Amino acid sequence: MTPPKSPRRVRRSTLAPYLFLAPFFAMFAVFWVYPIAYSFVLSFLNTRRRPWTFDPDFNWGRLVQDEFFWNALQNTMIILVVQVPLMLAFATLLAVAFGSDLLKAKGFFRFAFFAPLVLGAVPYSAVFRLIFNEQYGILNFGLTSIGLPSVPWLFESTPALITIMIAMTWRWTGYNAIILLSGLQSIPLALYEAAKIDGAGPLQRFFRITIPMLRPVLLFTFVLSTIGTLQLFTEPWLITNTGPGNATETLVTYLYKQGFRSFNFGYASAIAYTVAIIAAIFSLLQIRLVGGREVDR
Amino acid sequence: MKRIAALTIALLLAGMASAQTLTVWVWDINKPALESTIASFQEMHPGAEVVVEDLGNQNVYDRGLAGCAAGGFDMPDVYLVENNEAQVFWSQFPDCFTDLRTLGGEELLPLFPDFKWAELTEGDAIFAVPYDSGPTAIFYRTDLYEQAGIDPTSIQTWADFREAGTALNTTFDGTVKMGAIGKGQDDEWFRMLANQAGCFYFDEAGTEITVNQPGCVSAMETMKDLWDASVLHPAGWVEQIQFLQNDAQASSFFGSWYGGTLTAEMPAEQAGSWGVYLTPALEPGGVRASNLGGSALAIPASSDNPELAYDFVVNALADEENQLEILFEYGLTPSLLSLQGNPALNQGVDFFGGQAIWQDILGTLGDVPAVSGTQFFQEARNVMIVVVNDYLDGNYASAQEALDQAAQQIAASTGLPIAD
């Protein structure tokens, strides 16, 4: 026998959770919803001179034919297509090594490969700039001492892009390996035992059990790395200064220059929306292609 | 209650302390230079403290723009700004800086040359006080030139400079280069040479794009000529200093303020083996002067102590004694008109082997054409860094084609028309 609820009590009790959520939603509205919406509006304004005027073609029209934008997009895509798969392949191998019974001092190695992420981006970039210095850097010293030619890492286009990819790989492989390791540890050992009994070798076990079972985690790291690469800023900004010329310009460094160097918020917003759209398309594609079978099940 | 009272007192004390403290944002050699004026400033204002912070050139600009965009948040009391870059502040954020007329700034107008004021005033408002200028020159190592048998007085044109560089390459087997260019890092060489030829990104009124005019074309061709002859290292700011410190570079082409950087950064054993000669001409008998950089001090409107900040700026920049000290100790070229013809300029400088370099360098100031950086300076510069790099790499058939491309780019990003 429960007494009938008064309408007021019902209202109050449904209000309470919203009140608890209100501080978050207030923050979310001010720092997320508002800038996202406002930058959409900005992308249609000519913000070159005050007063700002409505002129959709000024930014979106420029974007289509802006060679510097297409160059930045191309650089970002090259990094995405070359660096991300390589890094994830390394990370998978590392994760297997981390999980292997043969490895002693696992804690130490896991930390050591994760450590680059703990380091601040600025000192790490400064050190990389020194390592890749053409005349006095240790990398070229190593190359020349084994008879290879010295490479102008920071002053020629392709070497500069490679420098960025090496730096990113150094920084993020361990991080992805730790995520993959957690996925690895959730694979039931019984599968491996059964495969062993059926006579599967280590390579077969890796390709037939480990990789398929890791698929969801691999997809996760793949999507994360893709979005991370599309937002790439730190390395080209601090190591190569987006140069030589615009050889290591990425979408976000270009966006930053337009927004905060040239003070062209309209164009920067148009670039930002383009990056977001590309990221969404890529994530969808990857989920369809890589995760497709997972979804079917 | 007690705690609140204590907190209030602490806050009040902090407030009082900051009331007497000026923060100044600068880069590089400007830090010790401006610090050298603090003692005389404190004689006028006993108890006032000045903190000069070296943030680095680009960071001062970036943080200043961000601060102004945020409505004057996180700004210092005194702000160092490059002349060329200054107009973006006045046009985008006219309320971010104090109009110095409100502090009596019109008294300063006759003390500095008009070409310095062009970028520092907007309409009637005065937003910054001229600090140093950057008349260009070649700084060179007398010992390295001598070893390669190069006579600096015979270098009259850039073609002579290239030939000397070839001689240097032969003597040192290519390990010591004649100079360095920030290829793909900055376009200073382009701006210095173009200025020499009377050309710039924009016309003097800042209303048209002139980057593909003949003067700029010859600047590009000169650079390509030197680059193809392998007489220049590719080097950013830091790399160039490394080359110089390691005796791998025999000269540097920069604004006169680079003398201060050399004095501060070079190892002691290089003191006395440096010299200066005038910028080589683009063609025989051509102009041997141009300007790169030079800066000014502004007072953000958010300063709690604009009067105190103004006194600091005036004492540092309009006082002959302080300016002479800044010149001789830190190598920053004064813009103060009353110093021209001052006998103190005939003084030899030890670091430069006793050469009276300031008389030579300041003597060129009158030949420098005035330019307007406009509020689009950074846009145009970002375009030119890329175009110069690609042109030197041989990606354009001609300098004219490269600059036409650059003009198109700058037009698309600024909305300004390209001059005929």
Image (cartoon, rainbow, N blue to C red):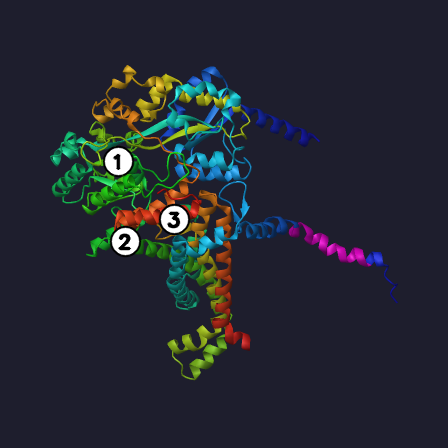
Q: Please identify the quarter of the rendering in which residue B141 is found.
A: top left
Given the image, what chain letter belongs to the residue carrying mark 3?
B
The image shows residue B220 at horizontal and vertical percentages of 26, 43
| Residue A15 among magenta residues | yes
Name the residue type under label 2. Asn
Confirm whether residue A127 shows in the render: no
The image shows residue A184 at horizontal and vertical percentages of 47, 69
Prevailing secondary structure of the magenta residues: helix
Answer with left or right where residue B332 lies relative to residue B64.
left
Answer with left or right where residue B72 lies relative to residue A165.
right
Confirm whether residue B66 shows in the render: yes
- Label 1 element class: strand
How crowded is the residue under tag 1: few (<14 C-alpha within 10 Å), some, or many (20+)?
Answer: many
Name the residue type under label 3. Gln
Which residue is found at the position 44% from the left and 63% from the top?
A177
Q: Earlier in the sequence, mark 2 or mark 1?
A: 1
Which residue is found at the position 30% from the left and 25% from the top?
B366
The alpha-carbon separation of the residues under discs 2 and 1 comes to: 25 Å
- Label 3 element class: helix
Q: Which residues are magenta?
A: A10-25
The image shows residue B266 at horizontal and vertical percentages of 27, 33
Which residue is found at the position 35% from the left and 17% from the top?
B338
The alpha-carbon separation of the residues under discs 3 and 2 comes to: 16 Å
Answer with left or right where residue B190 lies relative to residue B86.
left
- Label 2 element class: loop
Front label number (3 vs 2): 3
Return the residue nearer the eye: B127 or B324: B127
Q: Which mark is residue B409?
A: 3
Name the residue type under label 1. Phe
Q: Which residue is mark 1?
A: B253
Q: Earlier in the sequence, mark 3 or mark 2?
A: 2
Q: Which residue is mark 2?
A: B395
